[in-house]
Amino acid sequence: MITPPRSTIAGSAIILATAALLLVFLLFSYELNGSLLFTAALLVSAAAWFRQMQAVHMSLLSLLWILTYAIIPGLEWPFHMLLPLVVYAGFVWTVPSLRNSLLWIGQGRKGVDIRLLVLATVLLSGAGLLLWYFFTEPDLTPFFELLPEVPIVLLPVAGLCFAILNAVMEESVFRGILMQSLESALGAGMPVVLIQAALFGVMHYHPGALPSGVWGVGMTFIYGVMLGLIRQRARGMLAPVVAHVLADAAVFAIVAGLKLSG
């Protein structure tokens, strides 16, 4: 993974404004209005005008994400994130300046320290989810209904497919596109890790997330911090994706186990 070049003052301002816009969008994504779309389009236009490619990456993805919710309200997993990502990838592929400035894709280091961080993240996230379940006693019926109606022997395959798709999507957005743009504005450091983790956490506020609510925001914020630190330390995407896949597989196994035992 190549460190992105630092953005100008204008580019950095656009990136930080886009982060603020995403925060509002993720908090109130079920109450969209035209001002969010207008602001997102304005930020993309400003980034293109100033030729700030890192700002274009982040603002373009944000615009497509908001536009998807506006056109197809109530869109469920995985299309709520997959559709804007696919369209974004199409823009990146066809526009050379965007394609050449896409720097976050890369495996990175795979040392012992990285493996220990991945293991700790998976164990802590699984333990946190179990504690959340036993202390808050949430109604998991909506999530039970999302489990595929397949023979028990095929549930692990379904769980792995869910974990891979969800992890790749969320890591591409938060530890990939957003972190690269934020690093170009603020440099590689804790502020970037905290901002992307805050956005990741806020996304889990709504009832459709697991975990959700205030507990969900807090737990996934910590989870996002750990994944962001792994990404920075590994200087690549393989380690955070693996950690996310394993953690999501554990979540699937916990939910499936609770359903089968109940």
Image (spheres, rainbow, N blue to C red):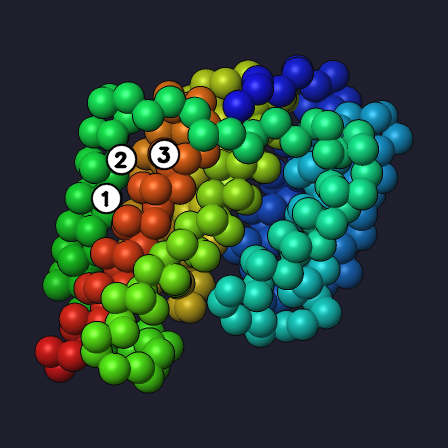
Image mark for residue 133 = none
| Quadrant in the rendering for residue 29 | bottom right
**Percent coordinates x, y for residue 19 in the rendering:** 60, 38
- Identity, as a three-letter code, of the amino acid under mark 3: Ala
Does residue 211 lie above or below 54 as drawn?
Answer: below
In the rendering, at what x and y percent does residue 176 appear? 53, 36
Tell me which numbered mark, 3 or 2, is placed earlier along the sequence: 2
Residue drawn at x 72%, y 60% as measured from the top left: 67
Task: Name the image quarter holding residue 241.
Answer: top left
Residue 63 appears anywhere in the view: no
Q: Is residue 188 visible?
A: yes
CB within 8 Å, label 3 to label 2: yes
Above or below residue 235? Residue 72 is below
Q: Along the horizontal axis of the image, is 155 left or right of 2?
A: left
- Counting residues from the N terminus, which is met first, the one under dot 1 or under dot 3? 1
Whole-number angstrom distance, CA of label 3 to CA of label 2 = 7 Å
User: In the image, which disc is placed on residue 122?
Assistant: 1
98 shown above or below 166: above
CB contact under 8 Å: marks 1 and 3? no
Report the label total: 3
Q: Name the disc covering residue 118, or none.
A: 2
Q: Are discs 1 and 2 less than 8 Å apart at CB?
A: yes
The residue that appears at 44% across and 56% down in the rendered structure is: 166
| Kind of residue at badge 2 | Val
1 or 3: mark nearer the eye: 3
Residue neighbourhood size for the residue with mark 1, other residues' Cα within 10 Å, grouped as few (<14), some (14–19), many (≥20): many
Instruction: Say the numbered circle drawn on residue 239.
Output: 3
User: Horizontal and vertical percent for residue 47?
Assistant: 80, 32
How far apart marks 1 and 2 lie (CA) works out to: 6 Å
The CA span between labels 1 and 3 is 12 Å
